Image (cartoon, rainbow, N blue to C red):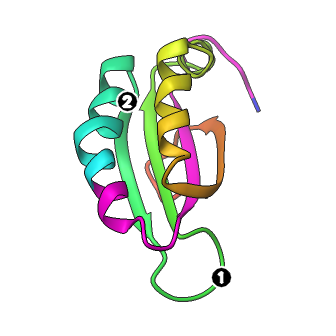
Amino acid sequence: MSQEVGVEVKVLMTWNVQPDKDREYFEFLVKQFLPGMQRLGLQPTDAWFTAYGEGPQVLAAALVPSYEAARYILASEAWRLLERKLLEYVTDYRYKIIPARETFQL
């Protein structure tokens, strides 16, 4: 991946919601995770739920102004706290940083 300064990137995250934790997960997502992402400078752009077929149950994406900014945010203690809390509700959590495009990205 190109790591040019000032090139907008997306942080793509995938996970599966743990069985029987749907309600608590959704409450955490709306009240803590999304606002926490925004406070850190991650601007949510997409959220996809797999209703049928293979693959992760949830795909979420957020825009960040640059690769450097994304790495800084994802290395922060505030982000680690959000991740730890997310892991109480999900499995198979993964993320990657990719150059941003306006079309669907996986």
Numbered disc 2: secondary structure: helix
Residue 4 painted magenta: yes
Q: Does 96 sit left or right of 40 as displayed?
A: right
Q: Position of residue 69 (x, y in %)?
A: 54, 14
Q: Position of residue 21 (x, y in %)?
A: 41, 65
- Magenta span of residues: 2-26
The residue nearer to you, when weighing 53 against 23, is: 23
**78 vs 74, nearest the viewer:** 78
Earlier in the chain: of badge 1 and badge 2, it is: 2
Residue type beneath disc 1? Glu
Residue 76: image location, x then y, percent = 56, 13
Residue 77 colored magenta?
Answer: no
Quarter of the image for the C terminus: give it: bottom right
Q: Which residue is mark 1?
A: 54
Residue at 50%, 25% in the rendered image = 81
| Residue found 24% across the figure and 47% down from its top | 30
Q: Quadrant of residue 72?
A: top right
Up the image or down, 69 lies above or below 13; here it is above
Q: Secondary structure at mark 1?
A: loop
Mark 2 belongs to which amino acid?
Met
8 or 49, nearer to the observer = 49
* Circle 2 Cα neighbour tier, 10 Å, few/some/many (<14 / 14–19 / ≥20): some
- Where residue 77 appears, as percent x and y from the top left, is 54, 13
Q: Which residue is mark 2?
A: 37
Q: Viewed as shown, does residue 48 lie left or right of 97?
A: left
| Residue 26 position by quadrant | bottom left
The local crowd at label 1, few if under 14, some if 14 to 19, many if 20 or more residues have their Cα within 10 Å, is few
